[in-house]
Image (spheres, helix red, strand yellow):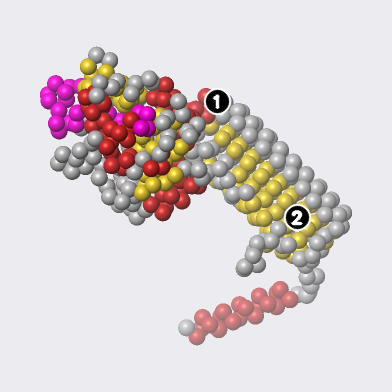
Amino acid sequence: MSVALIILAAGKGTRMNSDLPKVLHPIAGAPMLHHAMATGTVLDPAHVVVVAGFGADLVTASTNAFDPTARVVLQKEQLGTGHATAQAKDALKGFDGLAIVLFGDTPFLRPETLEAIAATTADVTVLGFEAADPGRYGRLVMEADQLARIVEFKDASEAERAITLCNSGVVAAPAPLMFDLIDALDNDNAQGEYYLTDLPRLARARDLSVTVVQCDEAETLGINSRAELAAADAQFQRSARIQMMEDGVTMMAPDSVYLSLDTIIGRDALIEPNVVFGPGVTVESGATIRAFSHLEGCHVSQGVIIGPYARLRPGTELAEDVRVGNFVEIKNATLAAGAKVNHLSYIGDASIGEASNIGAGTITCNYDGVMKHRTEIGARAFIGSNTMLVAPVSVGDEAMTGSGSVITSDVDAGALALARAPQVEKPGMARKLFEMLKAKKARQSRGS
């Protein structure tokens, strides 16, 4: 059966105390909403519908950034989860596959859990979990192997409160049936809202089958405050680090390494302490990322050594055996195999050829105050320390620039370019100058 995902993302999240919609607050460098959408991709959904409310324009932009084919619908009034789900009805008109309702602020459902939900043959499926401390969760009341009803804590009897099987909120049913049951919901409750939790009761009243798929309690973690956001991020980091180490990545101090949702690191890569991986980073097998480096939006090939204290910004592509050393920043640049930028340099909007060496303090002057320009350096070139390359400019294969040069014109292959003022030496002038300065200082001291 084909699948449609309905992701509820309309809440403001008052406890977040933020102008940003709750589902857009980040965990591991990605909005919570993206975590939910990423998990859903395991089902290859035919449709993804995100229900937005507060900050709908921002939610729409974020949704489209992750999946341009997803639909965003608007819940103008906050009238409960049933009402929110109903807003997806028109978007799924004519779809008779399985609809699964997820929550944009519940980012840790595993793909295996969604696959288990999709594999059930019941008319309605609810995701539940055994709670260590059931607290005020809704209880799942079972009769034989069927879910009879969901009872909220405040409405539960003592016997029902003793139940530890709790409701996650996730529900699935064939789309026509789901919307038919939602149409039968009423808001006869203290909040005057329409709740998905009433669907099992309505389904059983029609002699339909209702089953429960169980997951680990940690998968159902919802985020409602900044403190919970931080705890969720920490949970993600612990899990992701453990998985990477099991996959063959070496982390010398794993608790100090920060990963993003989409970080990819290959087997036998070595990650030293205090490395931050922003979004969009791929590190291939056998690379070394030394301490206190920051990577974002870049690709690092086999045998590359980065850092310590290096920064790779978006658009950086490093081929095999490249060296990027301490206090080097690279942005929107490609470095061919064996190229080296080892010390105190900025390489932006540039391409560096195979086995070229970039001396300490080199800067590609890529911005003229209005536009960005590129620097092209050929293979086996040698760029002397403290060279300023004023783009647009190119340096040919096996060319060389003298230390301290300001290169404003193209340099031919094999040529040596020197662009600095001639050195002038004045014998004895240093002593005379020091004597003048000391005398001036003495006069100032007497005057005070």
Residue 348 circle label: none
Q: Is residue 170 visible?
A: no
Q: Residue at x 65, y 62 (%)?
A: 372
Q: Residue at x 83, y 51 (%)?
A: 397
Q: Residue 72 appears at what percent x and percent y?
A: 42, 46
Residue type at mark 1?
A: Asp
Residue 168 on the magenta span:
yes
Is label 2 in a helix, a strand or a loop?
Answer: strand
Q: Residue furthest bottom?
A: 447
Q: Quadrant of residue 272?
A: top right
Above/below status of 275 relative to 128: below
Residue 131 on the magenta span:
no
Q: Residue 420 appears at what percent x and percent y?
A: 77, 67
The boundaries of the magenta stretch are 149-176
Residue 247 circle label: 1
User: Is residue 106 shown left or right of residue 147?
Assistant: right
Q: Residue 402 appears at what percent x and percent y?
A: 79, 59
The residue wearing badge 2 is: 376
Q: How many marks?
A: 2
Compute the Cα span from label 1 to label 2.
38 Å
Q: Quadrant of residue 117?
A: top left
Residue type at mark 2?
A: Glu
C-beta proximity under 8 Å, tags 1 and 2: no
Q: Work out whether residue 183 or residue 394 is closer to the camera in this orientation and state it.
A: 183
Q: Work out whether residue 63 or residue 230 is closer to the camera in this orientation and state it.
A: 63
